[in-house]
Amino acid sequence: MSIRTKGGILGSAIFTITGDAFADWTLNLPEPVSPVTREIFNLHMLTATVALVIMVIVTAVIIYSLWKFRKSAGYEADQNFHTGWFGIWSWVLVPVVVLGIDLSIAGKATKVFSLVEDTTPPELTLKVTGSQWKWTYDYMEDDIQIVSNLDRDIAESEDTYLRDVDNKVILPVDTRIRFLHTATDVLHA
């Protein structure tokens, strides 16, 4: 093993065990609280799992192919690959299997997203305008406007750091609410 390879391994090990490596990173969606968001979360997890499995299989086939068919001295490529059963049918079977998986996910997604699109009229419409480090909430029916600025007094160690505001929006429970999202400058909505 060369000195450069050893240095790369040592540097990677040091980088992994220091600094932000032990930070509490959130690598997934927040925990859902309603039945519809639970279904969306489950759909997200299904799609991510299927994508991961496909990626692992494709990576394994690529690594196997690189290892098995690497060029050595005096090697001649096999020209009969496409004439065998696997060589002919793999071009048909693999896309059909992947398309079948995609269509099954699309069927589940259609059911889930039909739950999201509820056409009953809302009891309350809230217009949320995002700006840099503040949000404006307009209760459309009552002509009430609330401006919420980022609360910078919260300690950085708090769980709600960069998410807590000075004027929180207040919403009624058990009420159908329609949110209209927009932004003033760049898309903070």
Image (tube, rainbow, N blue to C red):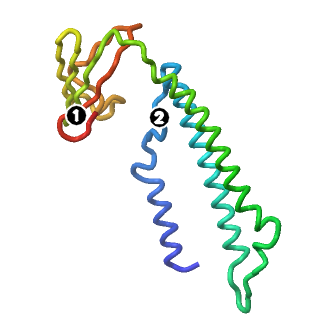
Instruction: Reply above or below: 175 against 159.
Output: above
Dot 2: what SS? loop
Q: Nearer the viewer, residue 74 or 84?
A: 84
Instruction: Reply above or below: 12 against 180.
Output: below
Residue type, mark 2 in image: Leu
Q: Nearer the viewer, residue 86 or 136?
A: 86
x%, y% of residue 158? 33, 30
Mark 1, Cα crowd under 10 Å, few <14 / some 14-19 / many 20+, is some
Dot 1: what SS? strand
x%, y% of residue 124? 31, 11
Mark 2, Cα crowd under 10 Å, few <14 / some 14-19 / many 20+, is few
> Which numbered circle lies on residue 183?
1
> Which residue was labeled with disc 2?
29
57 sits to left or right of 113: right
Instruction: Give the residue at x 73% y 83%.
Output: 77
> Which numbered circle lies on residue 96?
none
Instruction: Give the residue at x 22% y 41%.
Output: 186
